[in-house]
């Protein structure tokens, strides 16, 4: 596989990266969960000569049946790149270059490699501020809203597909303890879906975000901050709300603040993402206990 | 006598049990006693895999993690490959490889482990694997039968055999056998520890004792006889240059030997860096490693100096060695 891909890279990107006389080498990476079917992705960073950083990133899977993962990921990346193309945020996401099959029929994709290094915890503020600006930019492209947050929450509850009685208890809890009389409108912005410090590089030019496979799957503004901060402060989730960018919605001309309803919606989305891993654990008490740990 | 693919073997098995031909003495090895594995096999038969996974999770050295054979990406494997998995154990490499090659032959000298692997193959719906119980020094296969031979965590144990008194000679003999069984331009993969691995400061060597891999061989032998209940030191590991010498003595050409650094180890190769590409290892430490604590922050800072990276490479835990015939 590697040999075939390297040959193809040399042919396809010879001019763009001045490759004909270069030695190319690859560093293989995968996450601890990568071999357990759910995220069956393998990543190769491609280096030229003795360069200090990679110029390309190749993604593939271990078997032909999982090829769809690569096509989906490439489509999501293309979508994210299209939205920021020719903007000051163009370099925030990798550029999708090609998707193809290797000599054994297994799909692989090629994208530009992100520059920079993994951020330190004390760079969190900078990351939040830069990402906030990008989110405002994306919002201004569409100006669309989720007009009824209650209905939005109801839709996620349905998608969780838990036992009917547990679902009813969850609805009742939301009605009694979380719901307010106001109808809340939330800006609609495609979210990265897996914004963590592991998926961000930082350098002098700004932040670079990779692993865009879930881009656009969630479109409720602010989810990415919730996802990022709840990982950074996983040992004390109550700090998530304290560190949440307070003027995030102001940038979009919206008076909304992070509130109980939003946290509940974000938390349900988190669970929806992890649904396959959680399986039987996903019941009323698990959901509510998790939600309460943010307060 | 009934078993699949008789044509594969050049000698008759001593016995065939559960359709698995047995060519050598059945010798069990593993994380738990054989009785535990046998109990597990009975649970699989009577109550199924779900119950087995519930009861035996963490007790036996099997895994369903398909990333264990990721070193294969550095070999130009095709759909036509015929592969031999030597010392296949419970199939951590056999299963992911079987999905991408034409045919696999997996052998081990424990019948119980092969019996477990047979059940896993049925569960996964994999039909292109032949299993047998055999000893690497008495393999029943025709020469030049395989495109790839896998020795994952096997070479260091070659000294524990009944044919050779000298463990190094046993290792060379096993590599020579592999060379003979490989087709022209075929590949041998060896996953093995580095003799100088820094992690041996914290844990036990294969001998079951501390620091033996760092000692001169003669000293390790004396130490093992005194501390190791009379056992000899026969689980040899080497440095990179030591492996090159060993492999060359087995008839392979030095220019056909390639080293890779798997992290955290050859059994869980989440990250694989070509040994010779120094800049990749540096990038890995400086750019990809998270600054979680003082230790990692210090390592990252030191990694900016080439001498530190060279030292780190020298003391890396293990190697993926890929040798072309």
Image: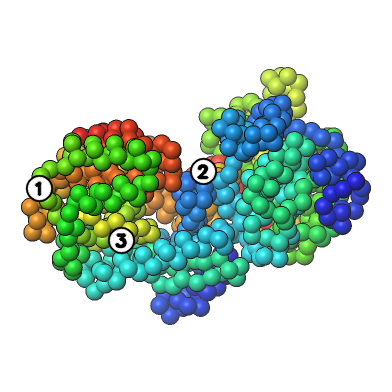
Q: Quadrant of residue A52?
A: bottom left
**Residue topped by disc 1:** A182
Q: Secondary structure at mark 3?
A: loop
Q: Quadrant of residue A141?
A: bottom left
Residue at the bottom extreme of this rendering: A15
Percent x, y of residue B225: 74, 22
Which residue occupies 36% across, 58% down? A214
| Residues marked 1 and 2 touching at CB (< 8 Å) | no
**Residue topped by disc 2:** B264
Which residue occupies 66% across, 65% down? B78
Percent x, y of residue B14: 90, 41
Q: Nearer the viewer, residue B27 or A166?
A: A166
Which is closer to the viewer, label 1 or label 2?
1
Which residue occupies 31% across, 63% down? A93
Is the residue B272 above or below the residue B184 in the image?
above
- Asked if both marks, 2 and 3, belong to the same chain, the answer given is no
10 Å neighbourhood of mark 1: few (<14), some, or many (≥20)?
Answer: few
- Asked if both marks, 1 and 2, belong to the same chain, the answer given is no
Judge left or right: residue B176 versus residue B255.
Answer: right
10 Å neighbourhood of mark 2: few (<14), some, or many (≥20)?
Answer: some
| Gap in angstroms between the C-alphas marked 2 and 3 | 34 Å
| Residues marked 3 and 1 touching at CB (< 8 Å) | no
Q: Secondary structure at mark 1?
A: loop
Percent x, y of residue A258: 15, 45
- Residue A216 is labelled as 3
- Residue B77 is labelled as none
Q: Nearer the viewer, residue A238 or B195?
A: A238
Judge left or right: residue B321 versus residue B23.
Answer: left
């Amino acid at each position: 596989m590697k040999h075939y891909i390297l040959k193809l890279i040399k042919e396809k990107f010879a001019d763009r990266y001045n490759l004909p006389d270069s030695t190319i080498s690859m560093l293989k990476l995968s996450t601890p969960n990568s071999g357990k079917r759910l995220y069956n992705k393998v990543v190769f960073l491609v280096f030229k000569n003795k360069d200090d950083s990679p110029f390309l990133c190749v993604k593939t899977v271990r078997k032909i049946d999982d090829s769809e993962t690569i096509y989906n990921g490439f489509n999501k990346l293309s979508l994210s790149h299209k939205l920021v193309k020719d903007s000051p945020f163009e370099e925030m996401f990798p550029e999708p270059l090609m998707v193809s099959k290797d000599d054994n029929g297994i799909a692989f994709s090629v994208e530009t490699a992100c520059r920079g290094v993994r951020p330190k915890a004390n760079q969190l503020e900078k990351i939040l501020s830069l990402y906030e600006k990008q989110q405002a930019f994306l919002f201004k492209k569409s100006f669309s809203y989720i007009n009824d947050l209650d209905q939005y929450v109801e839709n996620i509850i349905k998608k969780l597909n838990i036992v009917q009685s547990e679902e009813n208890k969850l609805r009742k809890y939301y009605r009694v303890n979380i719901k307010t009389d106001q109808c809340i409108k939330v800006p609609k912005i495609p979210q990265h879906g897996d914004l963590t410090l592991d998926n961000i590089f930082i350098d002098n030019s700004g932040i670079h975000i990779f692993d865009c496979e879930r881009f656009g799957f969630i479109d409720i503004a602010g989810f990415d901050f919730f996802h990022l901060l709840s990982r950074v402060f996983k040992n004390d989730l109550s700090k998530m709300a304290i560190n949440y960018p307070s003027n995030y919605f102001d940038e979009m001309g919206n008076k909304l603040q992070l509130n109980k309803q939003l946290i509940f919606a974000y938390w349900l989305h988190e669970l929806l993402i992890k649904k396959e891993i959680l399986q039987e654990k996903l019941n009323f008490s698990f959901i509510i206990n998790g939600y309460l740990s943010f307060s | 006598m009934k078993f699949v693919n008789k044509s594969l073997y050049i000698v008759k098995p001593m016995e065939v049990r559960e359709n698995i031909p047995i060519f050598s003495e059945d010798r069990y090895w593993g994380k738990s006693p054989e009785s535990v594995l046998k109990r597990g096999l009975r649970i699989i038969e009577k109550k199924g895999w779900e119950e087995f996974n519930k009861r035996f999770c963490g007790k036996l050295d099997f895994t369903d993690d398909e990333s264990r054979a990721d070193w294969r990406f550095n070999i130009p494997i095709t759909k036509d490959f015929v592969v031999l998995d030597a010392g296949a154990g419970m199939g951590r490499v056999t299963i992911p490889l079987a999905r991408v090659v034409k045919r696999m032959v997996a052998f081990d000298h424990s019948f119980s482990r092969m019996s477990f692997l047979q059940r896993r193959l049925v569960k996964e719906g994999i039909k292109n694997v032949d299993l047998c119980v055999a000893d690497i020094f008495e393999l029943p296969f025709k020469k030049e039968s395989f495109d790839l031979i896998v020795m994952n965590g096997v070479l260091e144990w070659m000294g524990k055999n009944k044919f050779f008194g000298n463990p190094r000679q046993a290792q060379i003999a096993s590599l020579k056998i592999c060379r003979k069984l490989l087709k022209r331009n075929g590949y041998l993969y060896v996953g093995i520890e580095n003799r100088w691995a820094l992690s041996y400061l914290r844990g036990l060597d294969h001998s079951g004792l501390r620091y033996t891999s760092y000692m001169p061989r003669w000293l390790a032998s004396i130490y093992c006889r005194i501390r190791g209940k009379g056992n000899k030191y026969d689980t040899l590991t080497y440095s990179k240059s030591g492996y090159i010498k060993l492999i060359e003595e087995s008839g392979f050409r030095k220019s056909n030997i390639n080293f890779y650094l798997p992290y955290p180890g050859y059994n869980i190769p989440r990250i694989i860096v070509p040994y010779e590409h120094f800049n990749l290892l540096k990038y890995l430490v400086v750019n990809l490693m998270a600054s979680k604590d003082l230790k990692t922050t210090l390592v990252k800072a030191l990694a900016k100096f080439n001498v530190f990276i060279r030292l780190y490479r020298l003391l890396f835990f293990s190697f993926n060695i890929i040798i072309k015939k």
